[in-house]
Image (cartoon, grey):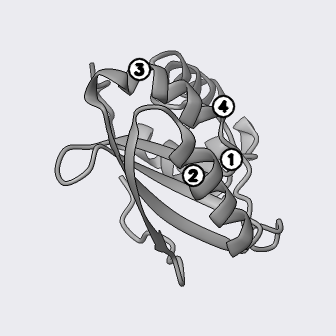
Amino acid sequence: MATELDDTDRRILAALRDDGRLSIRTLAEQIHVSRANAYARVERLRDTGVLRGFHADVDPVAAGLGTTAYITLNLSQHQWRPLRARLQALPGVVHIGLVGGEFDVILLVRTRDNAELRRLVLDEIQSIDGVLSTRTWLVFEELEPTLRP
């Protein structure tokens, strides 16, 4: 169930999205509310699951992950649940989406290089029971999203 957000909640989320290390005092000053109000709202946003956590924004290339790809999978439908855990355990898998359409799953993966990507696709993913086929798309450049909720 979605949580109703007012303008102040949205300003808090935008400020924390820009800098998740903001202190409550600095956050309160930036959005023009009391520290107690900012603290209570951040706690409510955490308790309701709107704020899932605070994370470092790591540049994958600078961290040694120079190859990014999307991999689509077609699966034996009845094997989705056991496959999910196997896919989550694979090194380099950043995001897993169960989708409808031409394929069943899309993975976002990051690896050191093309050789590591090849090993991940051919040796790991394609050897999983229930994976019927894969397709791989290399990402040449990533742009930061401009639209933010």
Q: Mark 3 points at which residue?
A: 81
Q: Mark 4, mark 2: which one is toward the viewer?
A: 2
Indicate which disc residue 131 carries: none
Q: Residue 20 carries which label?
A: 1
Please tell me which residue is depicted at 66% across the width and 72% down the height of the picture: 67
Classify 10 Å Cα crowding around label 1: few (below 14), some (14-19), many (20 and above): some
What amino acid is found at the position of numbered circle 4 in the picture? Arg
Q: Is mark 4 on a helix, strand or loop?
A: helix
The residue that appears at 66% across and 31% down in the rendered structure is: 35
Q: Are marks 4 and 3 in contact (CB under 8 Å)?
A: no
Dot 4 surroundings within 10 Å: few (below 14), some, or many (20 or more)?
Answer: some
Nearer the observer, 95 or 146? 95
Taking depth in this image into account, of 109 and 135 the one nearest to the observer is 135
Circle 3 sits in a helix, a strand or a loop, which is it? helix
Upstream in sequence: badge 4 or badge 2? 2
Amino acid carrying mark 3 in the image: Arg
Residue annotated with mark 2: 17
Pair 1/3: label in front: 3
Tag 1: amino acid? Gly
